[in-house]
C-alpha cells in the first residue's frame, strides 16, 4: 500500500506490550521480502508497547527495547522511536528521567553495536532532551523531534531546531 501511494518508506510498530512481534523470524522474513519486492524502506520502528508499560517504571519495557533492537538490526532499519507519553510522560518527573538515563546507559552499547539510533519522543523541551542525551553519552541516543509535539506545548520550534542542528535529533 505504501508503494501504491508513492511513499519511500514506512515506520513499523514492533508489536504490543507483551511481545515484540517483529522479533519473530517468519515475520522478519516477510518484511525483508516486502522491502525488496516493493522497494519501500522501513527506516524506523516504533515501540508502541511503551504506552502501557512505561520504560521509566516497568521492567518488561527493558526486554521489549532489547528485543526491538534485535528486530531493527534484522530488518535493517536504522531507528527506533521510544515514546514517552501517558503513564511514561517525563515532564516534571526528575526521578523518572534519572531512571531512563540509567537504563539508556545500559542498553546504548547494544544499540551502538547494532547500528541503531534510539530516538526519544516526548513532551520535554529540546533543552531537556539534550540534557538526557548528554547524560547518557552515547551516539546511539537522540531525540525523535516532532515539531507538532513541540509547537503544541508552546515551544519555539525554530529555536529548538537550531539548537539540535541534526546532530542530536532524528526529525519527523
Image (cartoon, grey):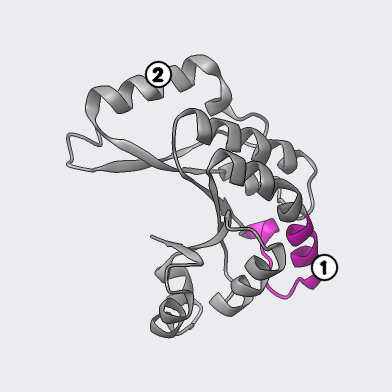
Image quadrant where one finds the C terminus: bottom left
Reading the image, the residue beneath label 1 is 95
- Image position, residue 133 (x, y; %): 63, 66
Quadrant of the frame with the N terminus = top left
40 to the left or right of 129: left
Residue underneath mark 2: 30
Query: Where residue 145 sits: x, y (%)?
Result: 46, 65
- Residue count near mark 1 (Cα–Cα under 10 Å), binned few <14, some 14–19, many ≥20: few
Q: Earlier in the sequence, mark 1 or mark 2?
A: 2
Segment tinted magenta in the rendering: 86-102
Q: Quadrant of residue 47?
A: top right
Residue at point 49% right, 14% down? 26
Which label number is shown at residue 137? none
- Residue 57 position, x and y percent, is 79, 52
Magenta span: helix, strand or loop, mainly? helix
- Image quadrant assignment for residue 4: top left
Residue displayed at 47% across by 74% down? 164
Q: Is residue 106 left or right of residue 43?
A: right
State whether residue 41 is above or below residue 137. above
Residue at figure coordinates x 28%, y 24% from the top left:
36
Label 1, label 2: how far apart the Cα atoms are: 41 Å
SS for dot 2: helix
Assess whether residue 51 is covered by the magenta stretch: no
Q: Nearer the viewer, residue 137 or 126?
A: 137
Q: Residue at x 55, y 33 (%)?
A: 15
Q: Residues within 10 Å of mark 2 (few under 14, many from 20)?
A: few
Q: Residue furthest top?
A: 26
Amino acid at each position: 500500500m505504501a508503494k501504491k501511494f508513492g511513499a519511500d518508506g514506512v515506520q513499523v510498530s514492533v508489536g504490543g506490550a507483551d511481545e515484540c512481534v517483529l522479533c519473530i523470524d517468519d515475520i522478519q522474513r516477510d518484511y525483508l521480502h516486502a522491502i525488496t519486492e516493493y522497494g519501500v524502506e522501513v527506516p524506523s520502528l516504533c515501540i508502541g508497547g511503551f504506552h502501557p508499560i512505561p520504560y521509566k517504571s516497568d521492567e518488561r519495557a527493558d526486554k521489549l527495547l532489547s528485543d526491538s533492537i534485535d528486530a531493527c538490526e534484522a530488518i535493517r532499519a536504522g531507528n527506533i522511536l521510544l515514546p514517552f507519553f501517558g503513564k511514561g510522560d517525563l515532564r516534571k518527573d526528575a526521578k523518572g528521567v534519572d531512571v531512563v538515563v540509567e537504563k539508556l546507559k545500559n542498553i546504548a552499547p547494544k544499540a551502538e553495536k547494532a547500528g541503531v539510533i534510539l530516538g526519544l519522543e516526548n513532551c520535554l523541551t529540546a533543552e531537556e532532551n539534550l540534557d538526557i542525551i548528554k547524560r547518557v553519552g552515547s551516539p546511539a541516543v537522540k531525540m525523535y523531534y516532532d515539531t507538532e509535539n513541540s509547537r503544541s506545548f508552546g515551544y519555539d520550534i525554530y529555536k529548538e531546531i537550531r539548537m539540535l542542528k541534526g546532530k542530536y535529533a532524528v526529525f519527523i
